[in-house]
Image: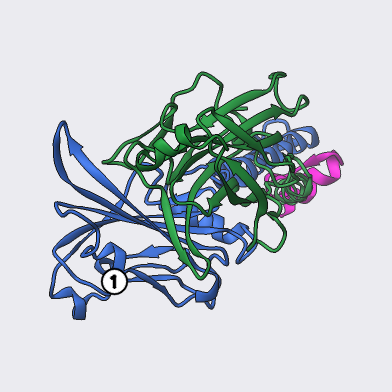
Chain colours: A blue, B green
Amino acid sequence: MDDDPLLLSFADALTCAFGASVALFLIFVVLVRFDPPSPVPTSGSQSSRSITTSLANDTPGSSSLVILAQSELPDISCATSSVFSIKVEDSDLENVRIWSSETEIWDGATRKGVHCRRVFEVPDGVTPNSQPTLVVNRANLELIEMRVHLGANAWPAWNKFSRVQIQPSDAISKPWILRVTGLPDMPVITPEDR
Amino acid sequence: MARRLQHSLGVKSTLSYIDMISGGFGAAFFLFLIFVSFPIETASTPSSGSRFLDIWLEWNDTTVVANMIVEFTPEASETALTQTFRYTFNSQFLTRSTSTGLVTYTGSAPKFWTSMAEAGFGLTSDTGLQRNTIKGNLVGQWMRFSDPCPGTYQFAVASHGLIASRLAELFLNPSIPTTNGRARFILSNGDATIFIPEDGTSGIEMTIKAGLDEDETRIPNPVTISVGANTSPSSLLHC
């Protein structure tokens, strides 16, 4: 009996069982969670992913949505700017407030042009039934910069703009320039994303 | 089998290799179930909704230049800071990058936020944000702060007077010009979003003085931002 190397004592079995249980515990409980779901980036995050997080966690409709749109023109005023023709559609238009600013651009004593900015305040935010969409009604040759603020999140970032080049022909082919969808994989889309 | 039986009969506490494998796995699985069901780690809460403070300020006279002042008193239990800090959000303490749109506060007080966005703060040639309403043109400013620190926020509106084309009136007219204004606030601590005033559409009414001195109009309702159940600890690290 003692000469059989395959025979183990009861204590050996218990030790082995305990070792196996620890090993399984490590495999299933610790290692599987070794790369835990990253803590929700929540506030102040700057990626477009976090805006989805905000949408998922904030009370729908309560995240005040603010959209900035701006451009620079060599003109005297913003009267011809496409930015000043932008409207918000697919949302409760009664609650959308539209603010504008017009700032002269100077390079020393030389007047370079004008900075045109429009701010859309959408207090209702984004809901499954409402996807606020920026629609341009005047298409000049113009580079429009846009940024979306939803709660404490910004798209594409607090220090970046999403840029869309507007062509005169876009009045028909590209009437909308930004849409806040709230979809997990692509919370904000531009015509290039279609 | 005969060998196994023989061994079993000889020493009752001795098990075969097969016994050890099957029993071991059974016990391992049993212990595994126990370990797995232990509340070893606290449930990873999906953390919070976003925390932010939104300030909308508007006034009726488009020739008045004004800006927001914030006095922040930190919540003592959440931060080592004890004093009240004052922030003036005008062109003296704010810079805005035209290329990135990033706004930077240059004052010495520690920031109670992590990121900040604005529109309409008073640059020399900036007319501020303007909005057409049935009551006429309004001028306004917007500021949004992410991750505001817990504490009490007292707001005031300061005016440096009138735009350049009307400055002479301040010397000729002994009375201080005024304009009606209103402020709205939206704040979220990750649990709930609160609109002040509650309807989210009107505003706290005030009369803004626009004299040559830097007059301040205090908004009577201070705002308290507390730590909520879903407040992410990482969003408080700067406080």
Tell me the residue at 62%/47% (across/down): A28
Place of residue A133 in the rendered image (x, y in percent of width and height, measured from the top left): 39, 71
Tell me the residue at 59%/43% (across/down): B208
| Residue in front for this viewpoint, A180 or B15 | A180
Q: Main secondary structure of the magenta part?
A: helix
Residue B15 falls inside the magenta stretch = yes
Tell me the residue at 28%/67% (across/down): A193
**Picture quadrant of residue A78:** bottom left
**Residue B47 seen in the current view:** no
**Residue A26 seen in the current view:** yes
**Picture quadrant of residue B219:** top right
Q: Which residues are magenta?
A: B1-21
- Is residue A1 placed above or below A79 in the rendered structure? above
Tell me the residue at 19%/71% (across/down): A139
Place of residue A21 in the rendered image (x, y in percent of width and height, measured from the top left): 70, 42
- Is residue B80 placed above or below A26 in the rendered structure? above
Q: Is residue B195 left or right of residue B122?
A: right
- Is residue B106 placed above or below A69 in the rendered structure? above
Give the residue pinned by disc 1: A136
| Residue in front for this viewpoint, A154 or B13 | A154
